[in-house]
Image: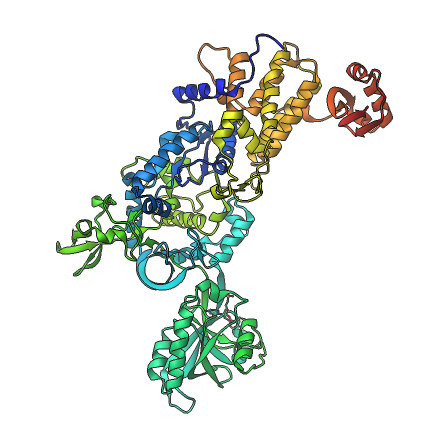
């Protein structure tokens, strides 16, 4: 080895470069009007206190892409923030007696330090921390704008209630009937709370055939459309008679059902209403039969204990009770019984359906169980009804009965009712001193001093709203705030946002398909209605990442002892090797286990590139050299742009094999190699660049170089390079014209004649020759 070339020791170069890059402000975003912008967004992390290998897997890829885009001449904006409000901080605080604010701030500090070792081009000047008043003031501002427009409203509904976390949960956060956070079984409870009328945007949130002109995964669009659940149908009225068929009809009373199959109305042989249907009370009041009354009361009590999910589940046995009431089928004019049934959902359609056991499977099961008549339908019925479009999507319950969040900026006045806090008095700051132990009422309510307030309208004594906003409010618009996190005249400056948004690519997890990304799209449409933005979709492209599992194939968790710690890996192999490994180990959207020991391979890959220094010569590149340079740089760039990071790395590996198979490597080849590798391994490439290519006195980083200009004419293969191996080890190479590559015997002859191959074959017996056409000749000896 050339004595002037030092050994590759990552710890000697990596921190050094990160310091220099920071000093030089290499990654500061500077608006540059003559360049196209490129906004890379990654879902902001929750400050749990530890940047684990999953974070690395998630964040390295966007960094690789951002670096590539920068070299392609884009002005890249790559900010980061912390999703700092939320239950885990509060729960940890309750468990350990540390205040959620202190816990969160300490974690942010730790994680920011850990982030530093990742060697990203994140511009930390734009960091946005959602638990800071500077941010949540604007949550309150947006909330008040929504209130003004009738989008935020106070309502009372049956809600998902987590008995452990003592809070309401949105539908999106109930997973198989359990709380997404703590796993407790969610129950239904009537709670008065704040809602956002996302249903007003149901139609706009639907994806059309062209994906609304943006590039989101088809699976995400389909799942969101499913969740929004648009159905077209009719509202049909069924007149009702009370108590028995003999009783006089009450003409004021009728049950309206929603049906998507009005053509089957002649087959409707019963009506079923939800246990929560408002008519149930009316029926009970008028019911003359005590037994029926008792049955209904008992039944309703039981049904309410089930979750919406349990009730919807197809496999669950349907239950119901007869109300004693008959209704009239408007097509056949026959009397049909009205039942209360738990498979009818209170907040879908009108909370009532017509049972057509002949045509509908669920109705069929129900009819069979309770011995109700099955009446054939002609499928030609034409009842007069009102056209109605129904959505499965519910309004978003937005207030939480917990402490660590944005206070709802509303005042409850005994005289004036609900009065918004005047905008110039925002923020309503979250007080530090409260008793945040869960007690079934919001912790803020226990801070009497904070709760007492004068009504901005009448000046009389009033109370603050003790609830806080769901943290998904924060993540619905944080990426607007990144543009200028200190902007003081509104949540964001529309002029500046117009320059940087929409986001060009949004990286995140599949778990945010139905919650977060839908909410973020909703906020964007709301901003558009306010005239604050002129686009309807906030992200042009959405890319979902997979998950790195533990070596045992299970989800990494401390209790299972299968956690891979990035800090240890960095110490052993260096940041660059970890970055390259994470890019290489599997496709970005795949989920797979960590392979112990495999990291060494990527470290060696970088070391081999480092060692190529000993072979640098000033010669010109040959035509074949150029083919490799142009072809690989093109493929690496294209793959990175398509977020196919693993194949980008394998292209570089193939090229390295080629370079090593030659006696020498030209400076031009090395220059191209370093640039093509630099987005993946920013430190080693900077070091080698400065050693061999930096000319100017002034520091000039490899990371501000342009991506090599590809000459497509050079990629056309009129010659192919065949790798020559002895027992699988690359020893030499052969260049033949592309038209010759299928002449097996001639190629083998040429291979045997190769000088280096001859040296290795000397005195050995060839047992077998394997030929992969146009690629490899392998002599097994
Ligand atoms: C009669 C009928 C006959 C129906 C038939 C379907 C098939 P989608 O398409 O999901 O919107 N339905 C109405 N309100 C309901 C509620 N609150 N809870 C449960 N089910 C309800 O479903 C619409 C259909 O679901 C409606 O059309 C109604 O049953 C039922 F062969 O009416 B249909």
Instruction: Name, please, the residue furthest toward the bottom.
Output: 246
Closer to the camera in the image, 286 or 449: 449
On-image quarter of the N terminus: top right
The location of residue 349, given as percent across then percent down, is 44, 68
Q: Which residue is drawn at 52% across and 49% down?
A: 220
- Give the residue displayed 59% in from the left and 20% down from the top: 607
**Can residue 720 be seen in the rendering of this structure?**
no
| 388 with respect to 87 (left or right) | right
Instruction: Report the front residue among 197 and 190.
Output: 190
Q: Residue at the top extreme?
A: 3
Q: What colour scheme does the image use?
A: rainbow
Q: Position of residue 591 (x, y in %)?
A: 57, 43
Q: How many labels does the image show?
A: 0
Relative to 412, 735 lies left or right: right
Write down the quadrant of residue 765 in the picture. top right
Residue 3 lies left or right of residue 312; in this view the side is: right
Percent across and percent down for residue 767 are 85, 26
- Seen in the picture, residue 440 relative to 570 is either above or below; the reply is below
Residue at left offset 39%, top offset 64%: 188
Relative vertical location of residue 518 with respect to residue 288 in this rendering, above or below: above
Question: In the image, is residue 222 above or below residue 370?
Answer: above
Query: On the image, which quarter does residue 48 sit in?
Result: top left
Q: Where residue 583 sits in the image (x, y, percent)?
A: 56, 33
Whether residue 431 can be seen here? yes
Q: Dividing the image into 4 quarters, which one contains the C terminus?
A: top right
Camera-side residue: 244 or 609? Answer: 609
Image quadrant of residue 117? top left
**367 relative to 42 in the view: left or right:** right
């Amino acid at each position: 080895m050339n004595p002037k070339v030092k050994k590759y020791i990552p710890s000697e170069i990596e921190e050094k470069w990160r310091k220099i890059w920071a000093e030089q402000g290499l990654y500061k975003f500077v608006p540059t009007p003559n360049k196209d912008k490129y906004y890379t967004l990654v879902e902001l992390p929750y400050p749990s206190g530890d940047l684990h290998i999953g974070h690395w897997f998630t964040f390295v890829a966007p960094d690789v892409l951002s670096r590539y885009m920068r070299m392609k001449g884009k002005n890249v904006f790559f900010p980061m923030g912390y999703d700092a409000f939320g239950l885990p901080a509060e729960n940890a605080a309750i468990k350990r007696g540390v205040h959620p604010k202190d816990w969160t701030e300490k974690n942010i500090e730790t994680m920011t330090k850990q982030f530093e070792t990742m060697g990203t081009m994140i511009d930390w000047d734009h960091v946005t921390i959602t638990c800071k008043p500077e941010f949540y003031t604007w949550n309150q501002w947006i909330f008040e704008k929504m209130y003004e427009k009738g989008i935020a409203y106070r309502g009372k509904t049956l809600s998902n209630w987590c008995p452990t976390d003592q809070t309401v949960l949105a539908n999106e956060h109930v997973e198989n009937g359990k709380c997404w956070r703590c796993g407790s079984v969610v129950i239904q409870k009537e709670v008065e709370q704040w809602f956002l009328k996302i249903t007003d945007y149901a139609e706009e949130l639907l994806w059309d055939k062209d994906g609304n002109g943006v590039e989101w995964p088809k699976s995400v669009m389909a799942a969101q459309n499913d969740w929004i659940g648009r159905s077209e149908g009719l509202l049909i009225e069924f007149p009702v008679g009370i108590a028995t068929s003999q009783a006089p009809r009450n003409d004021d009373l009728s049950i309206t059902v929603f049906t998507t199959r009005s053509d089957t109305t002649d087959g409707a042989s019963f009506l079923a209403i939800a246990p929560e249907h408002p008519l149930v009370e009316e029926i009970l009041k008028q019911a003359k039969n005590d037994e029926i009354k008792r049955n209904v009361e008992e039944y309703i009590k039981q049904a309410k204990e089930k979750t919406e999910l349990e009730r919807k589940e197809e496999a669950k046995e349907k239950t119901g009770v007869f109300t004693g009431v008959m209704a009239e089928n408007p097509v056949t004019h026959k009397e049909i019984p009205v039942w209360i049934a738990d498979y009818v959902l209170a907040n879908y359609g009108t909370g009532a359906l017509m049972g057509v056991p002949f045509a509908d499977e669920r109705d069929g099961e129900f009819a069979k169980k309770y011995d109700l008549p099955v009446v054939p339908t002609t499928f030609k019925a034409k009842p007069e009804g009102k056209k109605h479009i129904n959505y499965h999507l519910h309004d978003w319950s937005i207030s939480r009965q917990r402490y660590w969040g944005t206070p709802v900026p509303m005042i409850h006045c005994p005289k004036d009712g609900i009065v918004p806090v005047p905008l110039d008095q925002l923020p309503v700051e979250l007080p530090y001193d409260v008793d945040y132990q869960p007690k079934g009422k919001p912790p803020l309510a226990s801070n009497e001093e904070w709760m007492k307030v004068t009504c901005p309208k009448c000046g009389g004594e009033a109370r603050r709203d003790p609830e806080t906003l769901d943290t998904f409010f924060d993540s619905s618009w944080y990426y607007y705030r990144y543009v200028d996190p200190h902007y003081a005249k509104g949540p964001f400056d529309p002029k500046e946002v117009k320059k940087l948004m929409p986001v060009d690519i949004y990286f995140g997890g599949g778990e945010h398909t139905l919650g977060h990304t839908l909410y973020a799209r909703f906020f964007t449409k709301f901003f558009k209605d306010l005239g604050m933005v002129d686009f309807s979709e906030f992200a042009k492209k959405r890319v979902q990442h997979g998950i790195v599992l533990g070596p045992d194939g299970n989800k990494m968790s401390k209790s299972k002892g299968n956690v891979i710690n990035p800090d240890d890996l960095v110490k052993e192999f260096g940041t660059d090797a970890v970055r390259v490994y994470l890019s290489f180990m599997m496709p970005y959207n795949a989920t797979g286990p960590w392979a112990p020991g495999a990291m060494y391979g990527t470290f060696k890959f970088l070391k081999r590139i480092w060692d190529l220094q000993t072979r640098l010569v000033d010669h010109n590149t040959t035509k074949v050299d150029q083919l490799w340079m142009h072809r690989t740089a093109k493929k690496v760039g294209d793959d990175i742009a398509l977020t196919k990071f693993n194949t980008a790395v394998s292209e570089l590996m193939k090229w390295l094999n080629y370079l090593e198979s030659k006696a020498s490597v030209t400076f031009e080849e090395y220059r191209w190699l370093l640039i093509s590798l630099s987005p993946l391994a920013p430190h080693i490439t900077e070091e080698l660049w400065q050693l061999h290519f930096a000319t100017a006195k002034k520091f000039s980083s490899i990371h501000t170089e342009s991506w090599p200009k590809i000459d497509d004419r050079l990629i056309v293969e009129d010659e192919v390079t065949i790798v020559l191996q002895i027992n699988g080890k690359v020893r030499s190479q052969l260049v033949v014209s592309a038209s010759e590559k299928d002449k097996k015997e001639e190629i083998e002859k040429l291979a045997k004649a190769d000088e280096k191959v001859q040296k290795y074959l000397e005195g050995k017996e060839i047992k077998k020759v394997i030929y992969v056409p146009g690629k490899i000749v392998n002599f097994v000896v």
